[in-house]
Amino acid sequence: MVKFSPRAKFVAITIDELILVPIAIVLVYYFAREILVPATLLLIVGSALFVVAKYYLVYPSLAKETHQIYRMEGMHGVVISRVTGNEGKIKVGAEIWDARCDGPPIEKGTDVVILSRESLKVRVKPVD
């Protein structure tokens, strides 16, 4: 899995909004030339303020490795499809997750506890 730096993520989610600035300037040039200079200044200053505000509001969350909502260690679920070392499914709340286990297979209907999350799969063991 490719991991991007927080800075690369920020650029990726900001660049599409900044593409609108030159488009707006071109539209003003063709349809309202009399306000080209003030509109251009307003668009540039506004986009700079937008990037600064977005940086302070969004960047800290991009720097975190995972969001708290996806830390699943210790959560409980129920096996809905036999869990083995290679395949299986569990239900955690209203969500269904692919699951794996290290020991013997875990049968359908068994309560399990999540040991770790690996991408979109969870490693589980039966509740003691």
Image (cartoon, rainbow, N blue to C red):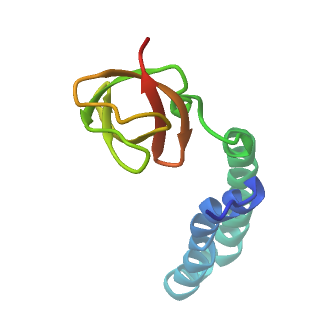
Q: Position of residue 17 (x, y in %)?
A: 58, 64
Which residue sits furthest top?
128
Image height of 77 relative to 2, above or below = above
Relative to 26, 78 lies left or right = left
User: Which picture quadrant has residue 98?
Assistant: top left
Relative to 46, 100 lies left or right = left
User: Which picture quadrant has residue 117?
Assistant: top right
Q: Position of residue 73 (x, y in %)?
A: 55, 25
The quadrant the N terminus occupies is: bottom right
Image height of 93 relative to 116, above or below = above
Using the image as rendered, state which of residue 78 and residue 22 is in the foreground.
Answer: 78
Image height of 38 relative to 80, above or below = below
The structure residue drawn at horizontal position 68% and vertical position 46%, both measured from the top left corner, is 62
The structure residue drawn at horizontal position 70% and vertical position 61%, both measured from the top left corner, is 4
The structure residue drawn at horizontal position 56% and vertical position 30%, both measured from the top left corner, is 71
The quadrant the C terminus occupies is: top left
Q: Position of residue 42 (x, y in %)?
A: 68, 62
Using the image as rendered, state which of residue 127 and residue 3 is in the foreground.
Answer: 127
Q: Position of residue 111 (x, y in %)?
A: 33, 19
Image height of 23 relative to 86, above or below = below
